[in-house]
Image (tube, helix red, strand yellow):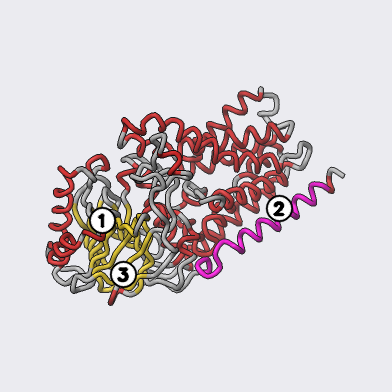
Amino acid sequence: MNPAQGWPFWLRFALTAVLGALVAFGLAPYGLWAVSLVALVLLAPLFLTTETRARAAWLGWAFGTGYFANALSWIIEPFLVDAERHAWMAPFALIFMAGGLALFWAFAFWVVRRPGSQAVRQAVFLAVTLSLAECARGYVLTGFPWAGFAQIWVETSAAQLLSLVGPYGLGALTLLATFPLGAALAQRGGFAAASALTVGSVVLVLGYAAARPTVVATDHVVRLVQPNAPQHQKWDLDYASLFFARQIEFTAATPRPDLIVWPETAVIAWLGGAQPYLDVISEAAQGVPVFLGIRRGDGPRIYNSMIYLDEDGQQQGLYDKHHLAPFGEYVPFGDLLAQFGIYGMAASTGSGFSAGPGAALMDAGKLGKALPLICYEAVFTQDVLSAPGRADFLLQITNDAWFGTRSGPYQHLAQAQMRAIEQGLPMMRSANTGVSAMIDPLGQVTDALPLGKAGFVDAKLPMPLAATVYSRMGDVPVILFLSALVALLWRNARRKHA
């Protein structure tokens, strides 16, 4: 007998929201993955108590809202940078973001729930359907896959499965290893099948992780520059020269590296008028190539860009960010909303930044080809998978000052680690306020500069591994498999109730 069966619905609703919040403690910076697993196991008994689909949907929404409210609590930080203009939006942003994303989960719970169906079968159905809902969250509209279930595994051996099945596959395995077990414990039936799913997942993780190759370092040394410019001072002319001088000092330091990387929008000038700045950078670099972030204009359009300066200080590469942050870098119907004083937080015009043409490779001289990612783009597997060829390394420049100092910067770093594992490629990461890091193809941080510290780190560039299964196949096999499994489970459920 399910112990939660006789509890009032309001209590089950509240407990489900609490369980969602607990699952989010598996994410960085906490990394309490065991808490996440226990909370996921305990969710199944509450789900099985729902008498109707409507109530199941409400529990799904409560679970998602609790989860995202905790996982995305950092989202209030950007609104506090210019508190006079934006602070009033902060609570609405968190409430609407958490509640809105939870609708994906509510729909999954609504689809699955059929009172009277076998408990473990329903739990499997829910795990698969919720996994598909997570796929949709990563792709629908512009997508927002931040805080996926797979992210709780970044610092464990389980993360290596990202190179085989990607984040949605690993998320599905997480749910399949927990939901059926919770259902079996609650209903005291189907324990053998549920245990087989859990044990099978553990065996797959340990076996695959043990088979992953060893990473070897190259002789190339990369300098990652971190000026630590607080967002409220970054564009202040009274402070901009100080932050630029810091980066020049770090760039000129000896011994000399093979490559220098500055963070996103590292230069206050626009590219068209930045030549005096670029000359100073080139002089400080003393013949070492430099990647750096800068804004540029092209007629009425503005772009968040990355450029490459070669050994002679000449610009030899340009990349424009193509996956922009809605309501940050641009606002839908921005020109109209600008008439009411509503702008994107990083934009000064109504329409905000324009999107570049798409993923591209940049030549980095003797270090090979770089796949550039600016800030938010490292969150999206599809942005990396859409590259026109295989890079030798991933290169992320970012301005994490927007994310505050609590969970946001650490979660952003964790997702960069995931992209490295998925592709079997090292990643260099230069962040304005941190964490700047060199990440190897197994997702391990080999060198880093902590959050909130001005300085630089000289790190050896790891060798890339062979192309992974996931880098060749992407999300399509996992989505097709989950879809086929949902169709099969749905048909069996209809037959049982016919």
Which one is in front, 469 or 428?
428
Q: Residue furthest right?
A: 498
Considering only vertical position in the picture, is 465 above or below 264?
Answer: below
Q: Residue furthest bottom?
A: 366
Q: Residues within 10 Å of mark 1 (few under 14, many from 20)?
A: some
Residue topped by disc 3: 317
Amino acid type at image mark 2: Val
Disc 3 to disc 2, C-alpha distance:
46 Å
Q: Residues within 10 Å of mark 3 (few under 14, many from 20)?
A: some
Q: Which mark is residue 486?
A: 2
**Residue 215 image position (x, y, % from top left):** 37, 69
Q: Is residue 470 left or right of residue 321?
A: right
**Residue 24 image position (x, y, % from top left):** 48, 40
The quarter in which the N terminus is drawn is: top right
Residue topped by disc 1: 270
Amino acid type at image mark 1: Trp
Which element carries disc 2, helix, strand or loop?
helix
Residue 440 visible in this rendered orientation of the protein: no
At x 31% / y 30%, what residue is drawn? 84
* Of callouts 3 and 1, the N-terminal one: 1
Residue 439 visible in this rendered orientation of the protein: yes
